[in-house]
Image: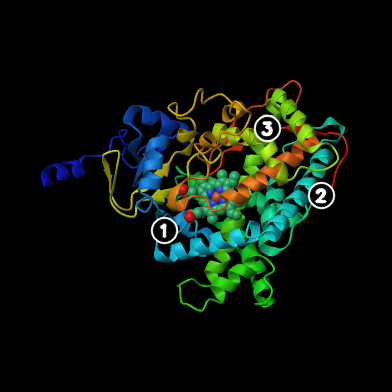
């Protein structure tokens, strides 16, 4: 009845006491996703915190998160109107704009562009795979060079250049050398992007921090600068494409996007700025995520030499030593995929999705959430949910294999790293192919070792992605150095 409904509407969401001015901002700690999971034990899987001037609802655990993102997909499909989000790609990013008819169109264009250049037909599939193979074999050479005379090195930047090159080849038909100083400098700057847009960043919730010198203000200034520089780089490249555009010849993703947005017949509200924004979304999203995934894989290989040996034996048996692995080998390399899924689950290196917001009032787990509420979705808590996973804190790839040694698809589907619902990552398929090929080729060609007297730490920095902090490894060539086709 109405009376009960009104009473429930008024029921405040559970959650910790919020201090004046800062709310719970000072309680998040270094690893907010772990704090969020701890708070869920006390207040339940749906609770509210206050960050500065914003109420934020935090969702935790497999059941609640899937219910919200899948059963209530439209209600949870929004993005908050954060100032940092508006600073991305001159406000024309698809990833950071709110749910609307125009956003739907924008997302469809981005999605079909990805498909057209990665899996549309056997030719594009092959071309995409060859790009990755070329990049992976180049990476092998660089790793070996950096490990000459048994030196140990941090692979982070080389992995970022490799991942960026795959996306630049798709979008611009051009890759950059690892020694290209300008490109490296740009990527080093962009590396800090995730610090500001990650859930729990204070820039957006404490606007008064902008009025006097403090670390948050300088972080936001750096964020605006890096976005301008990165977007400027993209705009230049897209402009070059516009000047040489030929409707009869689609050279790469930039041409394809120019074709559907700049040259569109219908007035869908999307402008040239959105063309640039789409290219920027695709390159930006494919940088940090893929390189971070590979960084954790290499680190965990070096940390677990017994698993690495098992993988080496498997790849030598399936592929042999005379050729490089290819995607056709994937179905025979279940343990390699299991290692990747376990890396995604165990590290949950995108611990919380990009912040969402509610597009209308919604009830989840019997609790009402008003329209336009900021929502944090704790993917880490799905991947460490004790109701779903046995010993979630232990790294054990074999949990994904069934008795026959095949990949257990029901279990791999339970890993949440690409989110779900209307905002689910649109690069998940190309990401999986990329990670598989890089991983398989690195493993086939190299063995990875940690420093003899150090135990590799899993310490990492928090942001949109969790990045390993102190990872030094050495790569050793296994047999003969092979080139791609
Ligand atoms: C969004 C994960 C690679 C394109 C996202 C989101 C996550 C994610 C968690 C946010 C979803 C949400 O807010 O609920 C990953 C991971 C990757 C990866 C773990 C690699 C291992 C890629 C690649 C591309 C891509 C390679 C494209 C080339 C996008 C785009 C969005 C997105 C465009 C925004 C979607 C939207 O807001 O509607 N990704 N991603 N991602 N991803 Fe990925």
Q: Give the residue displayed 28% in from the left and 35% down from the top.
A: 14
Q: Nearer the viewer, mark 3 or mark 2?
A: 2
C-alpha distance separating marks 1 and 3: 36 Å
Residue underneath mark 3: 299
Depth order, front residue of 237/163: 163
| Disc nearer the start of the sequence (1/3) | 1
C-alpha distance separating marks 1 and 2: 42 Å
Depth order, front residue of 211/154: 154
Residue underneath mark 1: 98
**Can you see residue 163?**
yes
274 w.r.t. 353: above or below: below
Left or right of 364 in this view: 110: right
Ligand 1 within 8 Å of disc 1? The answer is: no
Q: Secondary structure at mark 3?
A: helix
**Can you see residue 221?**
no
Q: Secondary structure at mark 1?
A: loop
Q: Nearer the viewer, mark 1 or mark 2?
A: 2
Residue underneath mark 2: 484
Indicate the quadrant containing the N terminus: top left, top right, bottom left or bottom right: top left
């Amino acid at each position: 009845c109405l009376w009960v409904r009104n009473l429930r509407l008024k029921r405040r969401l559970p959650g910790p006491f919020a201090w004046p001015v800062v709310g719970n901002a000072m309680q998040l700690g270094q690893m907010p996703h772990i704090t969020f999971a701890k708070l869920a034990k006390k207040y339940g899987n749906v609770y509210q915190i206050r960050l500065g001037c914003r109420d934020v609802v935090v969702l935790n655990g497999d059941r609640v998160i899937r219910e919200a993102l899948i059963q209530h997909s439209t209600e949870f499909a929004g993005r908050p109107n954060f100032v940092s989000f508006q600073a991305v790609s001159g406000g024309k990013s698809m990833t950071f704009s709110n749910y609307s008819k125009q956003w739907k169109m924008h997302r469809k264009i981005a999605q079909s562009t990805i498909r057209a250049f990665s899996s549309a037909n056997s030719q594009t599939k092959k071309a995409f795979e060859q790009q990755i193979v070329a990049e992976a074999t180049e990476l092998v050479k660089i790793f070996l060079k950096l490990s000459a005379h048994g030196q140990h090195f941090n692979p982070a930047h080389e992995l970022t250049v490799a991942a960026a090159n795959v996306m630049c080849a798709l979008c611009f038909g051009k890759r950059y050398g690892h020694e290209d100083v300008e490109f490296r400098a740009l990527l080093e700057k962009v590396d800090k992007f995730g610090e500001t847009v990650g859930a729990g960043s204070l820039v957006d919730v404490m606007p008064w921090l902008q009025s006097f010198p403090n670390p948050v203000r300088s972080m936001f200034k750096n964020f605006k600068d890096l976005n301008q520089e990165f977007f400027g780089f993209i705009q230049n490249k897209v402009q070059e494409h516009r000047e040489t555009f030929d409707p009869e010849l689609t050279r790469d993703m930039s041409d394809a996007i120019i074709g559907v947005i700049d040259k569109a017949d219908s007035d869908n509200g999307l402008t040239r700025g959105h063309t640039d924004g789409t290219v920027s979304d695709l390159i930006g999203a494919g940088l940090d995520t893929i390189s971070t995934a590979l960084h954790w894989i290499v680190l965990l290989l070096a940390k677990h030499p017994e698993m690495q040996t098992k993988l080496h034996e498997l790849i030598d048996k399936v592929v042999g030593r005379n050729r490089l692995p290819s995607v056709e080998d994937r179905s025979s390399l279940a343990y390699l995929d299991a290692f990747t899924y376990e890396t995604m689950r165990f590290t949950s290196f995108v611990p919380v999705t990009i912040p969402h917001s509610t597009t209308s009032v919604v009830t989840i787990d019997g609790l009402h959430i008003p329209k336009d509420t900021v929502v944090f979705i704790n993917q880490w808590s799905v991947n460490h949910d004790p109701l779903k996973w046995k010993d979630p804190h232990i790294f054990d790839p074999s949990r994904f294999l069934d008795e026959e040694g095949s990949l257990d698809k029901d279990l791999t589907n339970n890993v949440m790293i690409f989110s779900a619902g209307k905002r689910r990552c649109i690069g998940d398929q190309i990401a999986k192919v990329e990670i598989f090929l890089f991983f398989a080729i690195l493993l086939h060609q190299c063995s990875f070792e940690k420093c003899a007297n150090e135990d590799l730490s899993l310490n990492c920095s928090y942001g949109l992605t969790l990045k390993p902090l102190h990872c030094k490894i050495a790569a050793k060539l296994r047999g003969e150095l092979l080139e791609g086709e």
